[in-house]
Image: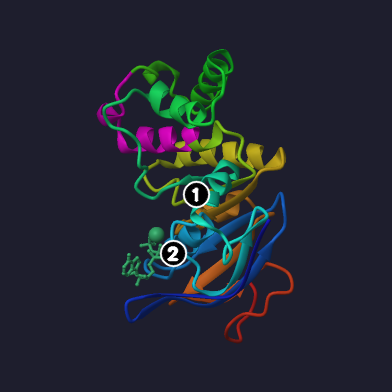
Amino acid sequence: MVEFKRVSHVFGSSWALKDVSFALDKGGFLFLTGHSGAGKTTLLRLMYAGLPLKRGHASVAGFDLRKLRRGHVPELRRRVSVIFQDFKILAQRSVFDNVALALEVRGVSRQHLERRVRAIVRALGLENKSYTRCGHLSGGEQQRVAIARSMVVNPKLILADEPTGNLDADLSTDLINIFKQFNSYGTTVIMATHNRHILDMVPDAHVLHLENGQVTETTLPNQAPAEPGGLL
Ligand SMILES: Nc1ncnc2c1ncn2[C@@H]1O[C@H](COP(=O)(O)OP(=O)(O)OP(=O)(O)O)[C@@H](O)[C@H]1O
Ligand SMILES: [Mg+2]
């Protein structure tokens, strides 16, 4: 589903990623870990073509990122859903509208759309807020809207950047269970997180640990760490 070979990324004169290689099979669950500034968001941005791949090679959901033309980016984004660290939801629009928008832009019929939006909004415990403007929601509620919006389209791959950052322990557990459920239906999940408790909740998941833009530890098979070091 995702393969990176010797990928590096530089912002100005600072290296955000150095020589990152890994492969994740379809249906896998991968955590990206590492301190703030380690390169997690940069790696996710490359995966959804939010940054151009200039060094190394990578393929995501069947797309060769090195050869990806601008015109093909929407096609990639139909298969790959992203949950951003800062949500990027529309504050003036309701929960229902924010989630529905993801289906509207894909041309889904109104009847099908209403059914799917209601089901996912319920699954995320937001049904009594369906018609509330997102600007009036708490941080954790907004985060759940962002998650509902990414999941409602049934993506092949979900990229989630710290999706539990604003949630308390109970909600984080519920949320991870939702990700696990989608994963068990075949959706590949890649999630950046600082939180060790979240890792413990998905014991079968793989881990890719970054330090200063380099992979220092990983449980993915056939992946040599950048520097000698034990597996997690
Ligand atoms: N647009 C940018 N311009 C310049 N430097 C950037 C940019 N985005 C990220 N960086 C730098 O690249 C490095 C990696 O940043 P990145 O956002 O990928 O880290 P992160 O692991 O996601 O951190 P956090 O846990 O705080 O979200 C950092 O040193 C950061 O300052
Ligand atoms: Mg980040």
- The local crowd at label 2, few if under 14, some if 14 to 19, many if 20 or more residues have their Cα within 10 Å, is some
Q: Is mark 1 within 8 Å of ligand 2?
A: no
Between residue 113 and residue 109, name the one nearer to us: 109
Magenta stretch: includes residue 136: yes
Residue 63 at x, y = what percent? 63, 56
Residue 31 vs residue 158, the one in the foreground = 158
Upstream in the sequence, badge 1 or badge 2? 2
The amino acid marked with disc number 2 is Thr
Q: Which quarter of the frame holds ligand 1?
A: bottom left
Q: Residue at x 51, y 18 (%)?
A: 118
Kindly identify which numbered label has been placed on residue 133: none
Query: Whole-percent x and y of residue 197?
Result: 51, 53
**Residue 48: where, in percent of width, then height?**
51, 54
Q: Which residues are magenta?
A: 132-149
Neighbor class of circle 1 (other Cα within 10 Å; few <14, some 14-19, many 20+) is many
> Which quarter of the rendered picture does the N terminus lie within?
bottom right
